[in-house]
Amino acid sequence: MIILQAEKLTHKFPDGTVAIKDIDLAISEGEFIVIAGSNGSGKTVFARHLNGLLKPTSGKILFFGEALAKNIINARKQIGLIFQNSDSQIVGQTVAEDVAFGPENLKTSASQVAKIVAEALEAVDLSQYAKQNPQLLSGGQKRKLAVAGVLAMKPKVIVFDEPFTGLDYPGVRQVLKQLVELHKSGHTIVLITHELEKTLAHADRLVVMDKGRIVLDGLPEEQIYKVAQYGIRLPEIGERGVGAMTWLS
């Protein structure tokens, strides 16, 4: 079943720059899709249309076949977006307060909020930090906190925008493990990245953007050898192919 679909999606900035143009893309429920592209390819602009943070100049996004713009509040509950800079998503004085922010704004009862927060923190292995100042967390832990905040809204889709930026090796492993576990638990994952060596072993599909358009779309093992022509570094694949590459072994 198609859960998210872009139809002729185009976005122009006020200065006339065309960021994305005529994007057609259907994302199936439960899919793990990697969207790659060099800087300026339009992938982040596209990601911000997926839950209505940006409004298209023309075209539209459909969520379960209905125009996302018709019910933007519901869309943002169902489609979570994890920003590249996790600090921009931190609003609470403690880790628990940060996760509680979304449910509290939906007028959820205090007892239910407490349950939701506990479940979300357990899911990302941050329960022991519930009373801590979130600014004291490591980079990888902050990304996990952002995931917990999104999970508290009970989303069907989670969009990650360059989640490995600025992380050391342990931080990358923390976030990658969380991505894989979220997918296994039934979430649809849309991952925006240029670091294919970290993610391709876990993806169902690879989409490549260039100059605001989709130029490749298909199975990772079929598309990976074509990415270099679009300014993306070809990862080391090895003798066993794409499926053998993983940072979690």
Image: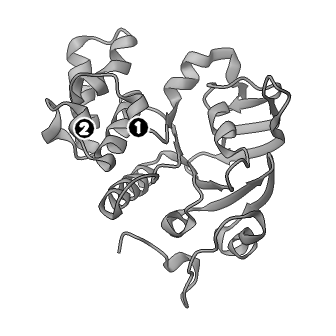
Residue found at x 45% / y 39%: 85
Whole-percent x, y for residue 239 in the image: 55, 91
Give the mark, 1 or 2, whose residue is nearer the N terminus.
Answer: 1
Between residue 226 and residue 123, name the one nearer to us: 226
Whole-percent x, y for residue 29 in the image: 59, 45
Which quarter of the image is occupied by the N terminus? Answer: top right
Between residue 72 and residue 193, name the one nearer to us: 193
Between residue 182 and residue 85, name the one nearer to us: 85
Q: Furthest residue to the top?
A: 107
Tell me where residue 135 sits by quadrant.
top left
Q: Which residue is mark 1?
A: 86
State the CA–CA distance, disc 1 to disc 2.
16 Å
The answer to whether marks 1 and 2 mark residues whose Cβ atoms lie closer than 8 Å is: no
Tell me where residue 174 sits by quadrant.
bottom left
Secondary structure state at the residue bearing disc 1:
helix
Q: Which residue is mark 2?
A: 121
Secondary structure state at the residue bearing disc 2:
helix
Could you tell me the amino acid type at mark 2?
A: Leu
Residue found at x 60% / y 56%: 34
Query: Foreground mark, 1 or 2?
Result: 1
